């Protein structure tokens, strides 16, 4: 009897599902191998797809009872080098029990999503995000009636969401974040959305919804919605009230970077008492932040940055005991900072991110900052804070970013302020009355990538030796810090992208060759550097060596900097003529060679259409203004005064339609002054 049942089972398997060998159906194994044959796998991620048991292959999951393939997890979690490429073979249709297909993070070269995927009727989870698909979103996806999860984010689709998505009635998660190949109005309506009754997570980040003025009324039909993410969707209106609030289960709401709505905060927000994440940043809200904010007692993240509020933050914010991250930067709030973050029945000991920069806050850092020991990011820049920085900040061992710039802080900064800041990555203390007093032999516990101490003062005039240990630093701004020293040799071996040492008294010669591979900004103005212009990296965009004692001619060191947009060598001792390679710097916007000893005539080849400011004043230049000056179509300011130019003013100057400032004084020009220039000096 048992033998007959077993025989019947084998016959049934052969007739309906193929041969079952080694825990894997042969027909499904062959289907997977056919799929693999169409895939380009340069990193051999599918190398395990060779044995007889396909259920043991990497990324393949079989049902423990039926041995059918039910999941195909081929997402790329690594770099683009590990991407699967090629084609997606319809052999996958053999996998009739496939419930999960994840091809995210790969690179399919801009092919369309195969229409046959809409025939995988058992699919419940489909993730094709970030895999370089293009073309149309196939309407056949609307046939996947069992689908619960769909992610087509970060693709290059033609601008339309198929109305057939309304058939996905069991869908609970839809992610279409930045799915389109170009910006534009891709969605005229959301009429398909109310049919997705069980929707819980809806992310349409970056989808242009400017024509869907009823977006909130439609979203309000989704009773089970817990996440709504619509940042950068060009939403133009937001009702401030709703007659009935249906999506009261909402825990995550992001409508940042929309509008500007030009309205007060909606009253219905304060009834979403389950919210844990709220982001309304940069959306043009105004008015006062109401006391009702304190109703949102489940909030752990509150982002309201870059709006136009007035008054103070209500004290009810201190009811939000679960807050971990706050961004209220650039919102116009004022008041004593201690009233906002000071002691309360929940002193925010779990706070990790506190962003209050660019407001009108006053008061000191004492009495509250020491308590927030879990802070990883603190931005209080551009306020009116006073007093010293508490040394206890050095115990904030999780701190990664600290910005206290543009306040009225004062006092000494010592090693104690950094004692345990081993994770510190960004330090910004610029424009305060702080004095940096650290030992020349100090070895910091951190590795910075960003350092800005402008207008702070080093107690000792020596160049800060502790910088030599910052092997990952790419942004350094130490302008006006009282350094009176030469630069050590090790200084030129750090990996800068941005370097500003201006307005100090640094002396000595620059190295003959600056071999930075990524440097785009070099500002050394107002120091005592001397010698010739060194060989410079071709990555430079901004170069300012003005107000030094740089000497010699303008030779080739600048000629290879084809990305240069700002060049100032004014107030040095540069001589010789202006070389013709200046004309090849076609992206120049500012060229200032004033107050030098340049001689000779101007080159004839001006074609810098981006040039806004040209200042060659106070040199020994001679000759006529070349007719090619009319190619400077964007020029707003031209200064040729105090030279030896002569001849008639070229008529071509009248083609410089943007010119508003013109100084030709103390030359030997003749002729008429062009009209339309606001400030003219000619003699």
Image (cartoon, rainbow, N blue to C red):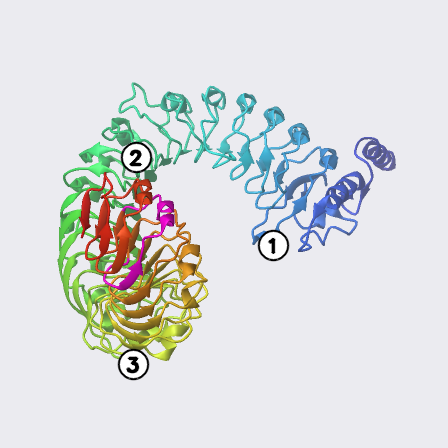
Q: Give the label on residue 81, or none.
A: 1
Characterize the local packing of mark 2: few (<14), some (14-19) or many (20 or more) Cα atoms within 10 angstroms.
many
Q: Is residue 676 above or below residue 462?
A: above
Q: Earlier in the sequence, mark 1 or mark 3?
A: 1
Separation (CA) of disc 2 from disc 3:
49 Å
Q: Is residue 524 visible?
A: no
Residue annotated with mark 3: 441
* Residue that appears at 59% across and 49% down: 76
Q: Is residue 172 above or below residue 516?
A: above
Residue lying at the far bottom of the rendered structure: 441
Which quadrant of the figure contains the N terminus? top right
Q: x, y (%) of residue 59? A: 65, 47
* Residue that appears at 67% across and 50% down: 58
Q: Is residue 544 above or below residue 632?
A: below
Please tell me whether mark 3 sits on a helix, a strand or a loop.
loop
Please indicate whether residue 391 sits to the left or right of residue 602 in the image: left
Q: x, y (%) of residue 681? A: 18, 50
Please indicate whether residue 417 sits to the left or right of residue 109 in the image: left
Please tell me whether mark 2 sits on a helix, a strand or a loop.
loop
Q: Is residue 627 magenta?
A: yes
Separation (CA) of disc 1 from disc 3:
43 Å
Residue annotated with mark 2: 283
Determine the image quadrant of residue 494. Answer: bottom left
**Magenta region, residue range:** 616-636
Q: x, y (%) of residue 517? A: 46, 65
Q: x, y (%) of residue 140? A: 63, 25
């Amino acid at each position: 009897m048992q033998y007959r049942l077993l025989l019947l089972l084998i016959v049934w398997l052969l007739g309906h599902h193929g041969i079952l060998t080694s825990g894997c159906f042969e027909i499904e194994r062959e289907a997977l191998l056919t799929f693999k044959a169409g895939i380009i796998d340069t990193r051999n991620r599918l190398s395990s797809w060779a044995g007889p048991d396909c259920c043991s292959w990497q990324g393949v999951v079989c049902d423990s009872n039926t041995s059918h393939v039910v999941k195909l997890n081929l997402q790329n979690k690594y770099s683009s080098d590990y991407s699967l490429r090629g084609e997606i073979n319809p052999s996958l249709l053999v996998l009739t029990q496939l419930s999960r297909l994840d091809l995210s993070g790969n690179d399919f070269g801009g092919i369309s999503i195969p229409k046959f995927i809409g025939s995988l009727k058992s699919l419940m989870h489909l993730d094709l995000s970030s895999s370089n698909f293009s073309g149309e979103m196939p309407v056949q996806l609307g046939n996947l009636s069992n689908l619960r999860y769909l992610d087509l984010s970060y693709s290059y689709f033609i601008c339309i969401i198929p109305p057939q998505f309304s058939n996905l009635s069991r869908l609970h998660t839809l992610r279409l974040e930045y799915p389109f190949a170009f910006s534009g109005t891709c969605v005229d309506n959301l009429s398909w959305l109310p049919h997705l009754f069980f929707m819980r997570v809806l992310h349409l980040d970056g989808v242009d919804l400017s024509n869907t003025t009823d977006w909130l009324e439609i979203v309000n039909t989704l009773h089970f919605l817990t996440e709504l993410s619509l940042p950068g969707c060009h939403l133009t209106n937001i009702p401030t009230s709703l007659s009935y609030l249906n999506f009261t289960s909402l825990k995550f709401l992001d409508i940042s970077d929309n509008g500007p709505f030009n309205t007060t905060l909606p009253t219905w927000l304060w009834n979403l008492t389950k919210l844990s994440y709220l982001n309304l940043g940069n959306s043009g809200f105004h008015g006062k932040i109401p006391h009702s904010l304190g109703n949102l007692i489940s909030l752990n993240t509150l982002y309201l940055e870059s709006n136009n509020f007035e008054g103070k933050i209500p004290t009810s914010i201190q009811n939000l005991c679960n807050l971990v991250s706050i961004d209220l930067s650039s919102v116009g709030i004022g008041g004593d900072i201690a009233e906002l973050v000071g002691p309360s029945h929940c002193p925010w000991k779990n706070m990790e991110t506190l962003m209050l920069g660019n407001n009108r806050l006053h008061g000191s850092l004492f009495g509250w900052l020491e308590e927030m020991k879990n802070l990883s990011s603190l931005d209080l820049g551009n306020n009116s804070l006073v007093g010293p920085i508490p040394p206890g900040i050095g115990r904030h061992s999780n701190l990664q970013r600290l910005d206290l710039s543009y306040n009225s802080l004062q006092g000494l900064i010592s090693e104690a302020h950094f004692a345990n800041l081993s994770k510190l990555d960004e330090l910004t203390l610029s424009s305060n009355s702080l004095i940096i007093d650290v030992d020349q032999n100090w070895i910091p516990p951190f590795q910075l990538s960003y350092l800005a101490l402008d207008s702070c003062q080093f107690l000792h005039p020596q160049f800060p030796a502790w910088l030599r240990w910052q092997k990952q630093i790419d942004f350094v701004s130490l302008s006006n810090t009282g350094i009176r020293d030469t630069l050590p040799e090790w200084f030129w071996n750090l990996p800068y992208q941005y370097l500003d040492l201006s307005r100090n008294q640094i002396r000595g010669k620059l190295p003959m060759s600056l071999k930075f591979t990524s440097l785009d900004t070099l500002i050394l103005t107002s120091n005592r550097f001397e010698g010739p212009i060194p060989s410079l990296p071709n990555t430079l965009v901004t170069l300012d060596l003005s107000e030094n004692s740089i000497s010699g001619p303008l030779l080739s060191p600048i000629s290879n900097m084809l990305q240069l947009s700002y060049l100032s060598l004014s107030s040095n001792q540069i001589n010789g003529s202006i070389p013709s390679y200046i004309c090849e710097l076609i992206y120049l916007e500012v060229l200032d060679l004033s107050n030098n000893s340049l001689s000779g005539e101007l080159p004839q080849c001006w074609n810098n259409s981006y040039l806004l400011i040209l200042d060659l004043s106070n040199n020994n230049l001679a000759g006529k203004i070349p007719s090619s000056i009319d190619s400077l179509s964007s020029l707003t300011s031209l200064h040729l005064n105090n030279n030896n130019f002569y001849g008639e003013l070229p008529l071509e100057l009248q083609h410089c339609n943007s010119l508003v400032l013109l100084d030709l004084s103390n030359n030997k020009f003749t002729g008429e002054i062009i009209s339309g220039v606001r400030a003219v000096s000619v003699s």
